[in-house]
Image (cartoon, helix red, strand yellow):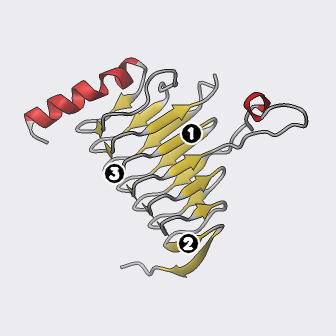
Amino acid sequence: MNIIQSSVAYLISIPARARGMRFGRRSFIGPGYDWLNVRLKGIIIGDNVMIGRNAWLQIDGNDLSSKISIGDGTNIGRNATFLVKKGIVIGKKCLFSYGVSIMDHDHLFKANISPMDSGLTAGEQIEIDDDCFIGARSFILKGVKLGKHCVVGAGSIVTKSFPPYSVIVGSPARAIKSLKKA
């Protein structure tokens, strides 16, 4: 980024920084991200990370150990949604297409209580290792661990963990092949 781009990126990130989000060097969050009435303290962004416009990153609840950690060189497309009760850890040099949603918890449903008042589950940490690609409008749900260099096809709903080099597609997602190391 040149000096003008860096200055604009810094200005856009001021509300997030003021609310506790930590940015690495040359990292950027696009305009339109949610920063009002959301907890951003505990979100740690590595160096050279790009997050597209209209992102919604939020830590729910008061557990100070809850976090979102995004590794160096990762690129996250527009309209990403990362909602956390426990934690999301994303490795280095991952690529997320637009509209990806990652949620480490579920809504509770109780008889005779509105879903608005029923609350959320405790959450289970999500881990995405280095060099993964997550296709457009995919969902990654609680407790999932994706090994290094996994590929998740567009529109997939990932409900379980997969080993390194897996190609994953569908709803619910399943492995269709394994990529060989180069």
Task: Choose top left, top right, bottom left or bottom right for residue 18.
Answer: top left
**What's the CA distance linking mark 3 and mark 2?**
21 Å
Which residue has dot 1 on it? 83
Which is nearer the N-term, disc 3 or disc 1?
3
Crowd band around label 3 with a 10 angstrom C-alpha radius: few (<14), some (14–19), many (20+)? many
Name of the residue lying farthest toward the left: 3
Q: Number of marks in the image?
A: 3
Q: Decide if residue 18 is on the left or right side of residue 173.
A: left
* Residue at 75% over, 31% down: 119
Residue 90 to residue 2: above or below: below
Check disc 1 and give the amino acid type. Answer: Leu
* Residue at 38% over, 38% down: 45
Q: Secondary structure at mark 2?
A: strand
Q: Decide if residue 152 is on the left or right side of residue 109.
A: left
Front one among 33 and 95: 33
Which is nearer the N-term, disc 2 or disc 1?
1
Task: Choose top left, top right, bottom left or bottom right for residue 7.
Answer: top left
Check disc 3 and give the amino acid type. Answer: Asn
Name of the residue lying farthest toward the top: 18
**What's the CA distance linking mark 2 and mark 1?**
22 Å
Q: Decide if residue 82 is on the left or right side of residue 19.
A: right
Q: Decide if residue 170 is on the left or right side of residue 90.
A: right
Residue 71 to residue 128: above or below: above
Mark sitting on residue 75: 3
Percent across and percent down for residue 68 are 50, 38
Front one among 91 and 38: 38
Q: Quadrant of the C terminus?
A: bottom left
Q: Quadrant of the N terminus?
A: top left
Crowd band around label 1 with a 10 angstrom C-alpha radius: few (<14), some (14–19), many (20+)? many
Percent across and percent down for residue 130 are 42, 58
